[in-house]
Image: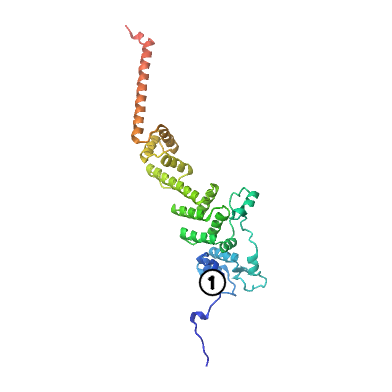
């Protein structure tokens, strides 16, 4: 008589590296996790990107991105013929390098700067001028920094919460570049993320550009970040007032438009009625909207202390009356001069 222990689904199992859970479970994306599990399940088989793409129902580009992450982490290796397999499995051709050698190899794209001020000082002396475009670290270096630094791991996790989505390899690289290369502290980066989300611009390209601007302006403390965000919110609110008052279609303002709106609303404290009055005078004189022309009007009002609609209209009436009087005096003078010239003598009998 034979006996069989029926374990059901547990009759067929495969090994999963502890590093997957310990280091990458919170950081890897869903496609990355699915791809790795599929490769582990088919250990010993030659796995092509086309096969993975069909099995997971995602594009080949997504598969390539997912597997690149695991390769750079040292959990997956690619054979000479292009097949993918878990690190540590013997290569089909018998000449594939071991995973440990790959993991130990230095990353050629690792950043040359560090976040420690003491370590950064000598390098700053050697290369005080940064390249025009920061160099981003590769995925392997990002994974290494996350594993080594609780602060960086927290940055990545909090970024996902603020952005409301899982961050991909490119996002993680950009965030680490902002910290290690641009020198922005973790709390400042998180404040920047919160601000960009609040204004509906949470794509990483916009965030990266804003981070470079903040670094150029030395926004490197919590207090400076708060002040920067306050000014940005004021500028946004000011343009909203101008946009609504003038009936401008909703769009992103130019830098000059933002500066003019901030000057009128936040600095000079002109009301929407005054801005509308300047607009109407601008159109009466030029036949079109010109923010520069409006600025000249508002600048003069600010200089002369005209801050209410009543003052502006009374000033206009006084100028109109002065012009009429000047015109009447000019006509009267012309008639008197004509009479003195003797031009009427020829008409006398």
Image spot of residue 346 (x, y percent): 36, 8
Quadrant of the drawing holding the C terminus:
top left
Classed neighbour count for the residue bearing mark 1: other residues with Cα under 10 Å, few (<14), some (14–19), many (≥20): some
Q: From the viewer's perspective, is 18 left or right of 195?
A: right
Residue furthest right in the image: 95
| Residue 333 visible, this orientation | yes
Position of 106 relative to 314 (above/below): below
Tell me, what colour scheme is on the image?
A: rainbow
Q: Can you see residue 80? A: no
Residue 246, image quadrant: top left
Q: Residue furthest top?
A: 349
Q: Residue at the spot x=56%, y=71% of the render?
A: 18
Residue at screen point 63% across, 66% down: 103
19 relative position to 265: left or right: right
Residue closest to the far bottom: 1
**Secondary structure type for disc 1:** helix
Quarter holding residue 88: bottom right
Give the percent coordinates (x, y) of residue 228.
Answer: 48, 48
Q: Is residue 266 above or below residue 51?
A: above
Residue 54 vs residue 3, the one in the foreground? 3
User: Where is residue 237 drawn, in percent x and y?
Assistant: 41, 46
Residue at far left of view: 349
Q: Is residue 154 left or right of residue 131?
A: left
For label 1, the residue is: 38
Decide: is 124 above or below 284. below
Describe residue 276's horizontal placement relative to residue 71 as left or right: left
| Coordinates of residue 60 in the picture (x, y in percent) | 54, 65
């Amino acid at each position: 008589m034979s006996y069989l222990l029926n374990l059901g689904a547990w009759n067929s199992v495969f090994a999963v590296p502890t590093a997957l859970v310990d280091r990458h479970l919170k950081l890897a994306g869903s496609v990355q996790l699915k791809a790795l599990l599929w490769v582990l399940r088919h250990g010993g088989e030659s796995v092509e990107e086309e096969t993975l793409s069909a099995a997971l129902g995602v594009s080949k580009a997504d598969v390539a991105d997912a597997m690149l992450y695991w390769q750079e982490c040292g959990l997956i290796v690619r054979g000479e013929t292009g097949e993918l397999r878990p690190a540590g499995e013997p290569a089909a051709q018998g000449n594939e390098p071991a995973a440990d050698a790959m993991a130990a190899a230095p990353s050629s794209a690792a950043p040359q700067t560090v976040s420690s001020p003491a370590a950064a000082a000598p390098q700053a002396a050697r290369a005080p001028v940064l390249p025009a475009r920061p160099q981003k670290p590769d995925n392997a270096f990002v994974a290494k920094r996350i594993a080594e630094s609780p602060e960086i791991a927290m940055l990545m996790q909090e970024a996902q919460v603020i952005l409301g989505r899982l961050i991909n390899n490119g996002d993680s690289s950009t965030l680490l570049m902002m910290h290690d290369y641009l020198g922005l502290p973790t709390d400042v980066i998180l404040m920047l993320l919160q601000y960009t989300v609040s204004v509906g611009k949470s794509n990483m390209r916009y965030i990266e550009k804003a981070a470079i601007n903040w670094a150029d302006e030395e926004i490197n403390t919590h207090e400076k970040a708060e002040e920067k965000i306050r000014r940005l919110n004021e500028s946004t609110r000011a343009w909203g007032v101008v946009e609504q008052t003038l009936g401008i279609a909703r769009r992103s303002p130019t830098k000059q438009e933002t500066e003019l709106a901030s000057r009128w609303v936040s600095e000079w404290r002109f009301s929407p009625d005054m801005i509308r009055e300047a607009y109407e005078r601008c159109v009466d004189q030029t036949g079109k909207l010109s923010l520069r022309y409006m600025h000249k009007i508002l600048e003069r009002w600010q200089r002369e202390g005209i801050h209410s609609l009543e003052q502006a209209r009374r000033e206009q009436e006084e100028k109109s009356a002065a012009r009429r009087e000047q015109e009447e005096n000019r006509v009267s003078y012309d008639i008197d001069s004509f009479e003195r010239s003797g031009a009427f003598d020829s008409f006398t009998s």
